[in-house]
Image (cartoon, rainbow, N blue to C red):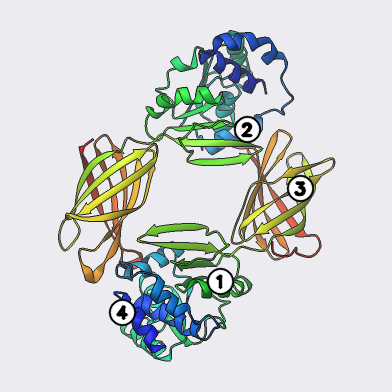
Amino acid sequence: MAEARAVVAGQHTSSRPAASLGCALLLATALPAAAASTGWDANIPTPYIPSTTLAVDEMLRVAGVVPDDLVVDLGSGDGRIVIAAARDYGARGLGIEIDPMLVRESAENARRAGVADRVAFREGDVLKAEIKAATVVTLYLLPQLVEQLKPRLLAQLKPGTRIVAHDFGFADWAPDRTVTISKNYYLYVVPARVSGNWRLEADLPGGAREFDFELQQTYQRIRGGARVPGGYLPAFEARLAGDRIAFVLVDGDTSLHFEGRVSGPVMEGVVRSGPGRNRIESHWRATRAGLPANEG
Amino acid sequence: MRAGSFALLLACVAAACAPAAAQVFPEFRYDVPFVPSPQVTVDEMLRLAQVSDKDFVVDLGSGDGRVVITAATKFGARGMGVDLDHDLIVESEENAREAGVSDRVSFVEQDLFKADLSRATVITMYLLPAVNLKLRSRLLELKPGTRIVAHDFDLGDWQPDRKTTVRKNTFLWIVPARIAGRWQARLALPPIERLLELELTQRYQEVTATARLNGVPTQVWEARLEGDRFRFVVVDTTDREHEASLYFAGTMSGDVMDGDLTRGVGAAATTIKWRAARTAP
């Protein structure tokens, strides 16, 4: 395993990919597909990789880190992402790293950067880490490991948590945003669970209305509509970003623009009827009718 | 509905397919399928264009005037409708009076290809595909940043900047500045001034760029042109120990482009002014 690390380190000009991918390789060797390391060495030509200070910068920029954030780096190597989040953005940070040497080095690096009070490093397997408190998760891991992590991330993380992956994203989950600066950076916002049936009530200008409202969901992509007597109003422009939801129902001559927040079995917010300055704003609220549908 | 079908009809006449249109005229006029009122679509077009009280909206093929009148009543804009049908112009003026916006809108009986678009900040249209394509070169000559909205029919290979679907497909295009050519900028970045040379080619708002930084070829990332605003990123490797991205945001005016340049991110970011001049078309 030390050899795998040495080989990878030799291919790159700096220690960030070496540390992180090295960590991934260490884990990979514990799995049946131990060939991952040889596959990497043999099949992937040595790319030109600019100083990965750039990659650290870009991941934190794409995540839109603010001082209130807790940034968790899975496979934190020498700690540079977590340390940069604390030093450059005033955030708090947690690094998870399987190599105890790198964990000690990270703590030392944090002391030197003067951010030891705001960051922590834990020795552990990224697949077992407790990350519920994270508001930002950064990943620079091999595709196989990224896929293995996905169900854990979706189960543990709060809606609205940003996940930024570098080079390798999730296979079947389309990113909310992709940025390409030398390399690809993928931003995923953990979506609230909204699939299923809802009872939607809105105080519309013409009077209070109630709809049977249903939603289907594939990650952040949602579609659905409202059942009304003798018809169906499809939800147009339906969007889900974390716990924020928006959609448009067209009722006769009026478009109703719904915007709101999802909180477990309730979503509520503001509905605007019509466009422009003479639109009327009122309140809407939906509660779950029955059990949540299975993840689509 | 009527607005739509008349727009289509008039467009067809104006598009020099007049003989054919004249033949189908009675059928076209009276054999109209039932379509719910497009007020929702009118609303959506104006919302997508983010019309405000600072805008002047020109509707090409204005029918009974509802787009221009809606822009005035619901969005506070001023506007002008252009239509070939005298009766519809009279009806539009009457509708504007009833809506109390006669002082802010006007209607002109004219071929839409001859309409004066010089005051327009927003163009709305619901025309046939062939007419859209025939108008496209004129639209591209409008002031950069002018918004064009249409529904159902697009502008061929000029991709929309945004698209929404509220019952129908609604498209927004932002007229791109003519940015193609060679550009040069001196960047006052410590420790040494950098010379940035850009070579830009453009297809509508899609810009392909190559660059040299102090003579060294470098790639340009995330290039985006919206109206007269251009953004891009170049990786600065001048100082190998402190490589960082240079985030450019500029506004173009003639042969000059200027704005902010940020090096790096977070607390480590520094922002300076930058200015580039076009050295060759």
Name the residue that disc number 1 marks.
A147
Q: Secondary structure at mark 1?
A: helix
Q: Chain of mark 1?
A: A
Q: Which percent across, then down, holds residue A29?
A: 49, 85
* Of marks 3 and 1, the one in the foreground: 1
The vertical placement of A24 against B130, above or below, is below
Q: Do the residues at discs 2 and 4 belong to one chain?
A: no
Task: Depth check: give the residue in front, A144 or A204.
Answer: A144
Q: Chain of mark 2?
A: B
Q: Chain of mark 4?
A: A
Left or right relative to B72: residue A9: left
Residues packed near mark 1 inside 10 Å, few (<14), some (14 to 19) or many (20 plus): some
Name the residue that disc number 2 marks.
B41
Q: Secondary structure at mark 2?
A: helix
Q: Sequence-wise, which precedes: disc 3 or disc 1?
A: 1
Q: Sequence-wise, which precedes: disc 4 or disc 1?
A: 4
Q: Which mark is residue A226?
A: 3
Query: Can you name the residue that lies furthest to the left here?
Result: B192
Residues packed near mark 2 inside 10 Å, few (<14), some (14 to 19) or many (20 plus): many
Amino acid carrying mark 1 in the image: Glu
* Of marks 2 and 4, the one in the foreground: 4
The vertical placement of B146 against B197, above or below, is above
Task: Depth check: give the residue in front, B165 or B52.
Answer: B165
Name the residue that disc number 4 marks.
A10
Residue A209 visible in image: no
- Quarter occupied by residue A7: bottom left
Residues packed near mark 3 inside 10 Å, few (<14), some (14 to 19) or many (20 plus): many
